[in-house]
Amino acid sequence: MRTVAIVGGSLAGLRTAETLRKDGFDGVIHFIGEETHPPYDRLPLSKELLSGKLPQENISLVSDENFAALELQLHLGVRAVGFDAASKLVSLETGEEVAADGVCLATGARPRQLGDDNPQGVYVLRTLEDCLALKAEFAVQPRRVVVVGAGFIGAEVAATARGYGLEVTMVELLEVPLSRVLGEKMGQVMADIHLEQGVDLRVGVGVEGLNSKADGRVGSVKLTDGVEIPADVVVVGIGVIPNTEWLEGSGLTLENGIVCDETLLAAPGVVAAGDVARWPNRRFGEMMRVEHWDNAIEQGIAAARRLMAGPGQERPFEPVPWFWSDQYDRKLQLAGIPSPQGEVEVVTGSLEERRFAALYEKDGKVSGVLGMNRPRHVMKYRQLIVDGVGWDDALEFASTQG
Amino acid sequence: MAYKVIVDYDLCESNAICMQVAPEVFEVRDDDFLYLLNETPGEEHRGRMEEAVNRCPKQAISLEDL
Ligand SMILES: Cc1cc2nc3c(=O)[nH]c(=O)nc-3n(C[C@H](O)[C@H](O)[C@H](O)COP(=O)(O)OP(=O)(O)OC[C@H]3O[C@@H](n4cnc5c(N)ncnc54)[C@H](O)[C@@H]3O)c2cc1C
Ligand code: SF4
């Protein structure tokens, strides 16, 4: 293999490039990314950058020096508009074509929008520009903020907005926020935290439409129950859509992401990684597309290795996914695949003190771990999933962990 | 070249991710603070130390050549 093209210049793409170089690949690497910035971290966009705690210079994912040392052929600020899996030819919006022997697709995901034609003052949060615009809004007081969607990103934005002392209403379609992921009991814990922090939480209700004022800015949010909530700023956090449109007609299978085999191969010489990749995770026996930071890293590393693997060296990618979310002074960590319908047991600390670790059961085994301000325990209990430990043994182990 | 592991404790939030990567070097204890068990783990550990650097979501770990 002499030439590799990486499409998508963010977390997964960067870790792919780094791994190729670290493992000794000295051919040409084309690094194609629509954003003009060198790879930066999205984590602080809803947290410390939005709150102003972290300066913008500190969100880079790689130092200038280390980035230069990768000797990449950079195509930043350039969108890929087409791909042919058979010839491995990537077409760029500039009309240029990039030929490669190996390709890693890491184009991530973009936020789902509320509608096509929104008034001013309505935001989604995915890019640095989104964050800076929202931050500028938050700095102008007083502002009434409506957050649509109480998922992780929405909840983080709500928490950060409360930190600015803004009035926050959070609207959620489900009766209990996050219940599809965490189950009702744990979802309610999250809901209570927002209520205690003064968020006006409206559950079991959707958004009917947005009303604008005479100056073209948003004025209120109309809910499906007829209630109208005044709003100066609206932040929409209703999930993401994998960026696969540019791959239509490429010969790849696209179905809620780029469909790969268990080793992350999407076609011969073509791999995918990060938020855009969907693959069968053997450990859990199901197709997964994971939208987490650490997965983008692990998958980027695995995809690079898969690209370089000789016959017989292919390895299945079967991680125990995990992620975290920071809201107010609480850090939520989730490992594995919680079974919202199954048993859930608090094994360390208590819900009342808001500092606990809980295990989820599925088919007689531990399938997931949820922690609140219990990082050490979460990492220990995650190992129970890795090791496939039975439910009773896991409870026994947890009882010795203090 | 020998190197040293450095943790910026102002950035570190004790999420124990480095401990997952290299428990013999990083340990988050009951007091929820991160302890560095070995500042100079040696060449044979360099790969995993680099992994810890990349995995830390706070970019709190760095390696310094001695
Ligand atoms: C505000 C925010 C907070 C988050 N907080 C957490 C958290 O606390 N914990 C956690 O685990 N995860 C968190 N995440 C999720 C995490 O950031 C993502 O999982 C991660 O960014 C995925 O990386 P990626 O490289 O796969 O995709 P992305 O980061 O989406 O990068 C894809 C890149 O590809 C580019 N691209 C897309 N299409 C094209 C094209 N056709 N041509 C060229 N380039 C293209 C995009 O512009 C983008 O730069 C958060 C995400 C956001 C937005
Ligand atoms: S991974 Fe980083 S933030 Fe987490 S405990 Fe280690 S040094 Fe601290």
Image: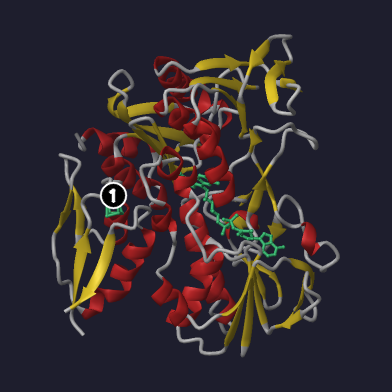
Decide if residue A8 is on the left or right side of residue A208. left
Relative to residue B18, is residue A131 depicted above or below? above
Q: Residue at x 27, y 61 (%)?
A: B61
Give how far across and how far down residue A283 sits, in percent.
Answer: 52, 53
Crowd rating for badge 1 (residues with CA inside 10 Å; few <14, some 14–19, many 20+): many
The residue tagged with tag 1: helix, strand or loop? loop
**Can the viewer see residue A67 in this picture?**
yes
- Furthest toward the top, the residue is A226
Q: Which residue is mark 1?
A: B16
Q: Amino acid at mark 1?
A: Ala
Chain identifier of the residue bearing label 1 in the image: B
Q: Is mark 1 within 8 Å of ligand 2?
A: yes
Decide if residue A268 is on the left or right side of residue B31. right
Decide if residue A388 is on the left or right side of residue B34. right
Image quadrant of residue A347? top left
Image quadrant of residue B1? bottom left
Relative to residue A324, is residue A103 depicted above or below? below
Give how far across and how far down residue A383 sits, in percent.
Answer: 35, 50
Report the front residue among B45 and A358.
Answer: B45
Give how far across and how far down residue B24 sits, in percent.
Answer: 19, 62
Report the front residue among A282 and A230.
Answer: A230
Image quadrant of residue A63? bottom left
Q: Residue at x 73, y 21 (%)?
A: A213
Relative to residue A145, is residue A317 depicted above or below? below
Give how far across and how far down residue A393 sits, in percent.
Answer: 32, 39
Report the front residue among A284 and A42.
Answer: A42
**Can the viewer see residue A317 in this picture?**
no
Relative to residue A381, is residue A295 depicted above or below? below
